[in-house]
Amino acid sequence: MLAGEHGRAGELGIVRAVGETTRTQRLALYLIYARLAHQGSRLSAARASEDHAVREGLRVGAFDEDELYAALEYLALQQRAIEAALAAKVTPGAVFLCYVASVYFEGEDNELAAFGYHRDGQWGKRQMVAGLLTDGTGEPLSIQR
């Protein structure tokens, strides 16, 4: 699983855009691969790494979900630079598809939620709107909230 994903990510320019020099960058790459492979939580990604030679293949050694959250923070901080590097590989005239979803929250304490327009009519509740941009074949290019 890992070798194929890493090879394809290299062909697409993802490895170069994210980087693989530091351990955090290699863990960030694993987060991308784990999201594509099983779409679970960071904890499930940490557990899955034990079964798929991730530690050896990406040279990261043992890690836990807290370290994956740190790698996720790295991805968030580098998102614009990563997207710019990947955008350079986009074919002129390519077709892009966008999906926007909104969710509302019942609780009061969620740093991602804010009051605003909700497409489902859930007025007076905190909410979050997220968008997904893909290329014409459905490959994800960007996720924004």
Image (spheres, grey):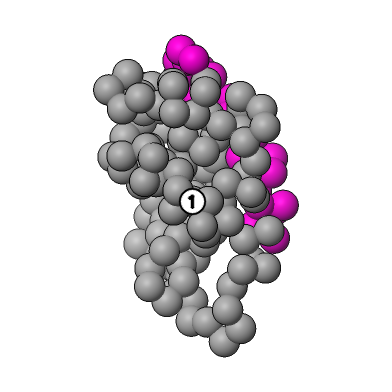
Q: Is residue 54 above or below residue 83?
A: above
- Residue furthest bottom in the image: 93
Do we see residue 135 in this rendering? yes
Q: Quadrant of residue 122?
A: bottom left
Q: Which residue is mark 1?
A: 9
Question: What amino acid is at disc 1?
Answer: Ala
Position in image of residue 113 (x %, y %): 52, 42
Q: Is residue 91 left or right of residue 126?
A: right
Tally of numbered discs? 1
Asked if residue 27 is among those painted magenta in the image, a careful observer would answer: no
Position in image of residue 39 (x %, y %): 32, 41
Under tag 1, what secondary structure?
helix
Q: Main secondary structure of the magenta part?
A: helix
Residue at point 31%, 39% (across, down): 1
Given residues 127 and 40, the one toward you in this image is 40
Asked if residue 70 is among those painted magenta in the image, a careful observer would answer: yes
Q: Is residue 1 left or right of residue 144?
A: left
Q: Is residue 137 above or below residue 16?
A: below
Position in image of residue 117 (x %, y %): 50, 61
Do we see residue 124 in this rendering? no
Residue at point 32%, 19% (across, down): 50
Position in image of residue 31 (x %, y %): 46, 36
Residue at point 46%, 34% (across, down): 30
Residue at point 45%, 60% (across, down): 140
- Neighbourhood count class around disc 1 (C-alpha, 10 Å): few under 14, some 14–19, many 20 upward: some
Given residues 104 and 79, the one toward you in this image is 79
Over which residues does the magenta segment extend? 61-84
